[in-house]
Image (spheres, helix red, strand yellow):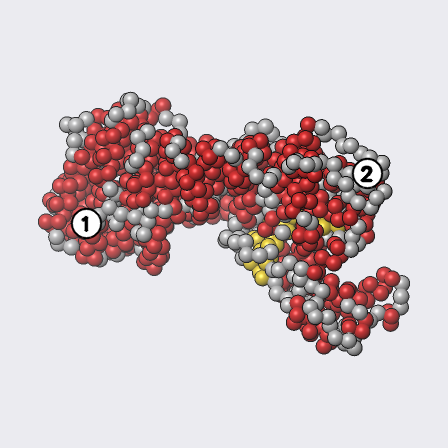
Amino acid sequence: MLFGRSAEIAAIDDLLGRARGGAGGALVLRGDAGVGKTALLDLAATRAGSMRVLRATGAEPESDLAFATLHQLLRPVTIPAGGLLDALPEPQREAVRGALGLAGAASGDRFLLAAGVLSLLAEASVPDGLVCVVDDFQWVDRASADALLFAARRLSTERIAMLLSVRGTLPVKGLPSLTLGGLPPDAATALLNADITSATTRSGASASAGVGVEAGVVRELAALTGGNPLALREIVRLLSPAQLAGREPLPDPLPGGAQLFGEQVAALSPQARQVALLAAVEGDLDLVLRAAARMGLSTDSGRVEPRDAAHAPGGSSADAGRAESRDRAPVLTGSSTDAGRAALHELEAAGLVLVPGAGVRFRHPLIRSAVHEAAAPADRRAAHAVLGGLCEGDRRAWHLAAAALGQDEEVAAALAATAVRARERGGYGDAATALARAAELTPDPVSRAARLKDAAVAAWLGGRPGQAESLLAEARERAGSDPVTAAEIDQLRGRFELNSGSAAEAVRILSAGESLSMLADAMEAASYVGDTEAMIRFGGRAAAHPEGFLRDVLVGIGLMLSGDGADGGGHGLLVRALERVGELTEAAEFLWATAAASQLGEADLSAELAGRAGRVARVSGMAGQLPVVLEFVATGERISGRLAESQAISEEGLELAREAGYGNTVAAHLANLAVLAALRGEEETCGRLAREALAIAVPHRVGLRVGVAAYALAMLELGLGRFAAAHDRFTAMAQAGPGAGHPAVVWRSAPDRIEAAVGAGDTRAARAALEAYGRRSAHARTDESRALLARCHALVEDDAGGFEEALRLHANPFEAARTGLLLGERLRRAYRPGEARPRLRAAMETFEAAGARPWARRAQGELRAAGESAEPAPGPLLDTLTPQELRIAGLVADGLSSKEIAARLFLSPRTVEYHLYKIYPKLGITTRTELARLVVLRKAGTARQDML
């Protein structure tokens, strides 16, 4: 029974109840050691009822072993007898199998792995739900922690409850937490008296023989211990009956704190202390007993006689480990094996350890701490050395590292190999830890710098940019005069700055490089800032490299920006590069193709290529770069008029970017979401999202994202019909310099700026903007680009024929609706209402379908003025779906199975089925075939011939 925890129990019951109903979630229990977190987790497991329970406990000795906790948690559902892995989409299945060591190859993509863990938990929740309980989460290895937290934040549609216990201040982002305090005096009294009664009953004495704890003593103990249940229980056990009854004063200081278990450890025999120390650094029972035997544990002399080289004259602990690895057969003398078992029995009898199956576990983590602190550093190193000689693989490397005194290349190499294995399975955080320790042990300065650099990359890909930057700074200090390593470090510094720091600083760092890849990074950084002059310089320097796709794009962009686009060959280079799109295989290459199309003034082709980059990124295992790619995919969807799809992609990208720690990518998705909110007329939401984006992008000098956020605010004004305010905002955007705005945003928003200027009566500004837009779009080859240019000319010249020409060319339904609205307004004002009404009606319906309410109201008002009742007709059935549901419906129409959709969207197959379960009744259908037909009809209905 738990005392004084009614609020906590209620919170757990609520979580379990919601999970049973398909609205799962997670809860973090925080508190000091001994406050009762484990007891609450035990209670959650017992109250699960028919729900499946999966449990794991973080262990400090295993905190550097990638996926150790995940293996422990998932073993019941991955072992052959009860394995559920076959139900997962293939990419997720292979990622999980690789991470858990069940297959030779692994994807190395932590997002794909995390999605696989989520899918596996969803399968394990069938039929009655699932409770995941992870104790001592602060000691869970980073790879496991990342995967579990990814899943924990996505349980709202699953029948899963996840409970984590955390000691200390470890941040657990995005999950609700409950902090456990000490027990109040009445609960403390009930706890202690229940313990005494239970102990008296077990001893066979009568109940009257038990000594209760006097109320005043309980109050004093509760005050002195903070009401910590473990401290109360252990201290009371050490007090005399007279002290418990209040007849004698309590000892000062209390036998608590560091002494809580220290006295029990000190009272052990030397043999038991040695076995306890081995168990404190290695939880495997067989290894502990073999190590005890190897160290010469003997009951004959009552002393522990070490037999390893660490205790030989001139020997080191690491030497001992290597010696043991050459000779693995334990040298057992006399009763050494029996002595180890006897020592273990002594520890059990003292209530310090438990031996569940093949492991040794301390009754409480503080006991392990007391054992560890009581041992001399040399004894700890000796224990690690012997264990290192008995282990293989990652365990061996970590034990030898803990045993090492000074630098040791052989041990460092073993740790580096451990990092490679962790990285290949997606355990980037643990790889970073291993490489950082390997660097400490590396004698050669250049090799040390290289390992620090690799550690920084692993930390970055593991979503820990702060650690990555610290490691890289140290690597730079250690690199010395080695030019190759120094250049690699500088390129990484620039990439890190570009993703999460100052884009202007990234330009400065990357501008020192001469390799094509570094010039490409420099060009990218300058494009983020909006520094045209720097982009021209980098393009010119790229011309010294051999011809090829990337070189052509860089040189072509530089020439186009310099004004030598047509005559200087920039246009031809970009066209030639785009002709090689069929040869491209990597998402980064498609993004450069996107940039090439953009420079040619073909925004629609640019958007299409961004979408291809996203599809490649999802299936190629980009090791965490997907959030960055999704910046461009979401923008492309918006530019193409697919607003719901853009919303869903940006929401996904924002979540992934926050998990990865990519601050500038967070700003990108916030800015795009602000534009979408503007188009919907959501003034408060648009303002909030734009402010959040600007709070990141302005100090980081990311002019591209500053420009998009400013564009959102301008579009909000334009959509609401506040033309003068919109014109002012567009004008400010056009005048902003590098870091505060962006030429590409100015170019892409030119049609909007021209419309605002005409609406505000500033025809001079409209003509100037049109002239600049015409120059930039002169080489555009796609129909949509020509349509926008025709609309702009029609606006400035007030030419109805220009609007008609634009409508014939439009491929983007949203832009077609805007052109139709502008034409309808002019036809009505020219007293041609019969011609205006079909244009206005079609525009209103398109805006309604897109959720662009201000634009729909504007069309509705014009339609009424043209003499037609303007109540909007019910929208198509698919318009009732959420952005995520619409994406799933589209993928169903493309013929993808639930597993394939799950793999594409980082969901579990059951989450996909959940969404389909909601989609069908919304649409009044029951099959995938009917859903696919509706999607196809919707696409056919938005063809430009039928739009207006």
Q: Secondary structure at mark 1?
A: helix
Q: Disc 2 marks which residue?
A: 337
Say which residue appears at 68% left-offset and 30% top-offset: 323
The amino acid beneath tag 2 is Thr
Say which residue appears at 55% left-offset and 37% top-offset: 407
Please name whichever residue, 898 or 284, is drawn nearer the observer in this view of the structure.
Answer: 284
Q: In the drawing, does residue 770 fall left or right of residue 399?
A: left
Marks 2 and 1, the one that precedes in the sequence:
2
Q: Disc 1 marks which residue?
A: 735
Residue 261: where, in percent of width, then height? 72, 57
Q: Is residue 806 above or below residue 542?
A: below
Residue 600: where, in percent of width, then height? 23, 33
Q: In the drawing, does residue 245 fall left or right of residue 701?
A: right
The crowd level at tag 1 (other Cα within 10 Å; few <14, some 14-19, many 20+) is few
Please name whichever residue, 108 or 610, is drawn nearer the observer in this view of the structure.
Answer: 108
Instruction: Give the spatial CA distance, label 2 vs label 1.
Output: 82 Å
Residue 635: where, in percent of width, then height? 33, 42
Say which residue appears at 55% left-offset and 44% top-offset: 142
Name the residue furthest front. 313
Say which residue appears at 68% left-offset and 27% top-offset: 326
Please name whichever residue, 571 or 226, is drawn nearer the observer in this view of the structure.
Answer: 226
